Image (cartoon, rainbow, N blue to C red):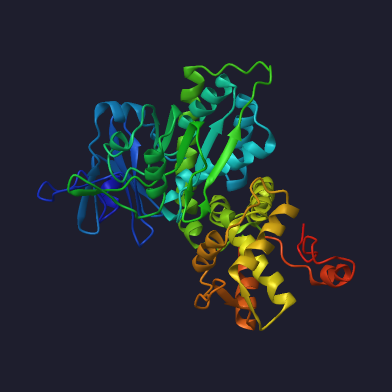
Amino acid sequence: MSAAEAFGTHRANGPADLSPVETFGEIFGDNTMIELIRNARGGADLMLWDGKQQVSGECISHGGNSYAGARLDRSVLRQLILPKTCAPHSSTRDLLGDICALMIDLVDLDQKQAGLLARLVLDSAIVDVLPIAPALVITGSDMTRGSRLMTLLHCLCRHPLSLTGVTPARLCSLPSGGRFTLLITQSTVSKSLKQLLDDVSVLDSKIPVGGRLIDLFGLQVLRCDCLPLVRSGQQRTIEIRLNATGKMLRRFDSSMQQRIADEFQARLLGFRRANLFAAGRIQFDASRLDMTLRMLAASLAAATPDEQELQDEVVDLLRDDDNERRSERWTDPKSVACEAVLVAYDGKPGESIYVGELAQIAHSILLRRQAEDPEVSPGELGKVLRALGIKTQPRDAKGIKLLLSDDLAQHARSLCREFGGPQVDKKRYKADRSRTSSNSIDPRIVV
């Protein structure tokens, strides 16, 4: 009996009367998975796995439907690295450690950089269950190490495509639904391309092109000078800066690249089989990090769904980014506006204050924190207050007023906690109030 016959409802080279669904892969509710693999002829076949057995062929049947590999242009098929088979990944810890070792040995990354990038490689295997696709931006003057890192990622990541000269129109010409890891090398990224990359970073997002909807969701790696990639206020970018070290790198020729790709693509498929569904169920507490980093942290933690200790390491790996984000909060207009409201409320709760007076408090906060541009106009502050859902009173002859109610103070405190910025220090206010003149910077402002 053949393997296909043993499968029962799973058949290689299914019946001719079924019109096959072209696919890069499928995930079914019964935990069955179909994957695109490289066949012995250099083309692409499908491999079906039901948790116990696997069968492969040009066409696969499951659940009454027939599936065939997505039709790809020959140039795309040659560029795309696919696993030739599936191999045990050993353990998540071992696979992560082996990828880290390659990063350190071949690209001379430090342990932290290697740990972040190894998790991104694992994320490429489970990207189907991530709400937002993480991105990597490679910068720095060391062209050799930058190029080598891109080559290594092309060997390691799932469905990698190395591209250059990318524009929004060219990107939208790619096949839909490939869950590609886009490896883009070019000097600049236009604002429109950056916006498109941010738009397609959300799972199940679709882009209308020529009367059809295309799906370009997948990890993104950019080697260029590029602003951070953000989606809905969530920072999804890891930046790796590679500067010249003067250290001689190990040889990394085409034969070594092929060996690495063959081994790790097979192990990555084994990892995907073992962890995809668990990664989709993971509950990671990222509240210790700035709110803009929490979704990125959750995605990195999902790369090790069966290793709680490795998940906890994500917080430490993102600590420098967290400190930078929190530092930026000290001068963020929304955070400063909330603090100004709390300072005003602490001074005269239940009374009203003009937005112009509130702007002076905000100005004092920014001065104390040595902001580059401490000027705050009442008009600008009014827009920020409205964006925060803070209602003002009707304008009178002196301007727009704000009622400093208990509800407003509670709302402002809640926003301060959410933003992760500094908050009013009442103890310091009471201690300093008596020795501070009315013309001084408000002593209640935390620095």
| Image spot of residue 77 (x, y percent) | 30, 30
Write the residue at 60% across / 30% down.
Answer: 102
- Tell me: 429 left or right of 62: right
Q: Position of residue 92 (x, y in %)?
A: 58, 47
Query: Which residue sits furthest front?
Result: 397
Q: Nearer the viewer, residue 373 or 155?
A: 373
- Which residue appears farthest toward the left when viewing the image? 17
> Measuring 48% from the left and 18% from the top, which residue is drawn there?
255
Q: Position of residue 344 (x, y in %)?
A: 69, 72
- Quarter residue 164 falls in: top left
| Image quarter in which the C terminus is found | bottom right
**Percent from the top left, x then y, of residue 438?**
80, 67
Q: In the image, is residue 228 above or below residue 76? A: below
Closer to us: 337 or 197: 337
The foreground one among 66 and 376 is 376
Residue 186 higher or lower than 21, as above or below: above
Q: How many marks?
A: 0
Against 382, is 348 above or below?
A: below
Above or below, comparing residue 309 to residue 167 in the picture:
below
Q: Is residue 305 visible?
A: no
Residue 226 or residue 97, whichever sits in front: 226
Name the side, left or right, on which 213 lies relative to 338. left
> Can residue 375 be seen here?
yes
**Point 58% across, 38% down: residue:** 239
